[in-house]
Image (spheres, helix red, strand yellow):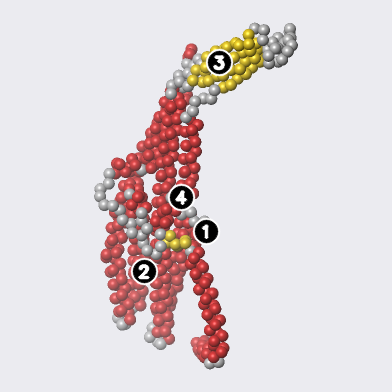
């Protein structure tokens, strides 16, 4: 009864369409003009949306990541360290002093001008500290080594951002391809469900089997929605890495997978470790700590303050010269001789050396891990490309052919499709893992080669 009512509604609907089609030519011309206007408007909106979308290649993403906010923060720390070098590389300023003394309050100061006649001893002096023990040299050396460490920190920050950007870019590219793959699977599932519905109406298929195809179509639709959500997430992760200030949803990766190729040949792992930015930064901090420790030991050599002054005392002489010398009596009679500063600096030196060893071990572990991950990811991707995917496609094609000829059940067809879908998604993951492993290894071993990729 319900199906008969629906058929009557469809009949009335199509009769209405035929009546509209039989209208006069002028009405059709007006309708065509309105339709063209809507089409042009839709096309303009589509072009505007496409113009707003930002498509990046891997090379463009890497170049943008070299100047993002994290790198800017590291460069700010470098600029501050460079200012410390200017502050350290200077001698103590001379000190200008003046005084009024010998004022006889009992007998009076006498008459006349205050500066020239009154009996007041007026003095103008100059004092300067002579730093001994090469304190200025050692202080400057420590600041310079800190600058070198800060520069290495900038290089390491750039490398870290390049690693993050390359991984996020490949993830975005993989999610875009996943959307295309699950979209094709969804269309195939919807087509199968539609065919099954027609076969049920014709009495050629059980309603239970048609329901299963409808469930598969709904699952495929859900997978497509999830894939689009993952694509948006990947774009949101990549956006701050490349300094994108607009909506991250408009960020797209180039549809072509980048060709990542590294120069062949054996690599000197020991040399690579010492040339890494994080190892260089830790090594420079050891040098800065050594200079600071030497400077702490130099404090045991007391600084001497030289001074001189010219006195003007009417009634006695108008040109009196005074010479002064001052120095702290440190370390005498069992007194304090900067043992605390030396002990503190020595502890910091030991800490810097331990930090260097820790960074070296971590760097070695990372290099070994990246090398192993690259070899494993390459073998896995090659296996899927050469063996697993072709066989899964062949099995699925044979299942489709057999089902169309009635030689295969619907359950077997759905199993073959599920196997192909899972295999294609696993192949996509394997290719993405290989690309990320290759990018990470290249950025650590041959960054100039990888940064030239388009």
Alpha carbons under labels 1 and 3: distance apart: 67 Å
Asked if the residue under mark 3 is in contact with the one under mark 4, i.e. CB atoms within 8 Å, the reply is no
Residue 387 vertical placement versus 209 (above, below): above
What residue is shown at x 27% (from left), y 65% (from top)?
387
Mark toward the viewer: 2 or 3: 3
| CB atoms of marks 1 and 4 within 8 Å | no
Circle 3 — which element?
Answer: strand
Q: Which residue is mark 1?
A: 246
Look at 63% across and 8% down and name the residue there: 317
* Mark nearer the N terminus (2 vs 3): 3
| CA distance for labels 2 and 4 | 40 Å
> Which residue is more in the foreground, 98 or 170?
98
Label at residue 421: 2
In the image, residue 64 above or below residue 155: below
Q: Residues within 10 Å of mark 3 (few under 14, many from 20)?
A: some
Identify the element where label 4 is drawn. loop
Q: Position of residue 225 (x, y in %)?
A: 46, 67
Closer to the chain start, of discs 1 and 3, is 1
Say if residue 102 shows up in the picture. Answer: no
Q: CA distance from mark 2 to mark 1?
A: 35 Å
Task: Report the residue marked by disc 4.
Answer: 67
Res. 118 image quadrant = top right
Alpha-carbon neighbours of circle 2 within 10 Å: few (<14), some, or many (≥20)?
Answer: some
Nearest the eye: 444 or 392: 444
Disc 1 on helix, strand or loop?
loop
């Amino acid at each position: 009864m319900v199906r008969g009512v629906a058929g009557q509604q469809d009949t009335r609907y199509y009769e209405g369409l035929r009546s509209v089609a039989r209208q006069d030519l002028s009405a059709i011309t007006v309708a065509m003009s309105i339709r063209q206007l809507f089409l042009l408007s839709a096309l303009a909106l589509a072009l505007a949306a496409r113009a707003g979308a930002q498509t990046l290649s891997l090379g463009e993403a890497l170049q943008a990541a070299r100047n993002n906010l994290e790198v800017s923060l590291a460069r700010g720390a470098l600029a501050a360290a460079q200012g410390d070098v200017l502050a350290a590389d200077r001698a103590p300023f001379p000190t200008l002093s003046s005084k009024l003394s010998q004022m006889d309050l009992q007998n009076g100061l006498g008459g006349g001008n205050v500066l020239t006649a009154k009996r007041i001893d007026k003095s103008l002096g100059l004092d300067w500290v002579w730093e001994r023990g090469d304190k200025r040299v050692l202080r400057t050396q420590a600041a310079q080594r800190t600058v070198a460490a800060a520069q290495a920190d900038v290089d390491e920050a750039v490398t870290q951002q390049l690693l993050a950007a390359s991984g996020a870019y490949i993830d975005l590219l993989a999610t875009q391809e996943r959307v295309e793959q699950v979209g094709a699977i969804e269309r195939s599932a919807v087509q199968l469900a539609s065919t099954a519905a027609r076969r049920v109406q014709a009495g050629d298929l059980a309603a239970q089997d048609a329901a299963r195809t409808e469930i598969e179509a709904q699952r495929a639709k859900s997978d497509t929605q999830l894939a689009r959500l993952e694509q948006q997430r990947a774009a949101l992760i990549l956006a701050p890495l490349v300094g994108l200030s607009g909506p991250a949803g408009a960020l797209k990766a180039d549809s072509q997978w980048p060709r990542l190729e590294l120069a062949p040949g054996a690599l000197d792992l020991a040399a690579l470790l010492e040339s890494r930015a994080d190892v260089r930064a830790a090594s420079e901090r050891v040098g800065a700590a050594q200079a600071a420790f030497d400077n702490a030991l130099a404090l045991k050599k007391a600084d001497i303050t030289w001074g001189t002054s010219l006195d003007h005392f009417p009634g006695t002489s108008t040109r009196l010269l005074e010479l002064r010398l001052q120095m702290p009596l440190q370390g005498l009679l069992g007194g304090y001789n900067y043992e605390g500063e030396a002990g503190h600096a020595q502890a910091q030196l030991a800490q810097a050396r331990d930090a260097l060893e820790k960074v070296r071990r971590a760097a070695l572990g990372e290099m070994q891990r990246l090398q192993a991950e690259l070899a494993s990811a390459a073998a896995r991707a090659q296996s899927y490309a050469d063996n697993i995917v072709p066989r899964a496609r062949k099995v699925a094609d044979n299942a489709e052919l057999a089902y169309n000829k009635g030689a295969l059940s619907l359950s077997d067809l759905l199993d073959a499709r599920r196997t192909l879908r899972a295999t294609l998604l696993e192949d996509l993951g394997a290719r993405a893992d290989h690309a990320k492993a290759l990018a990470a290894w290249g950025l650590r071993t041959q960054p100039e080669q990888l940064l030239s990729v388009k």
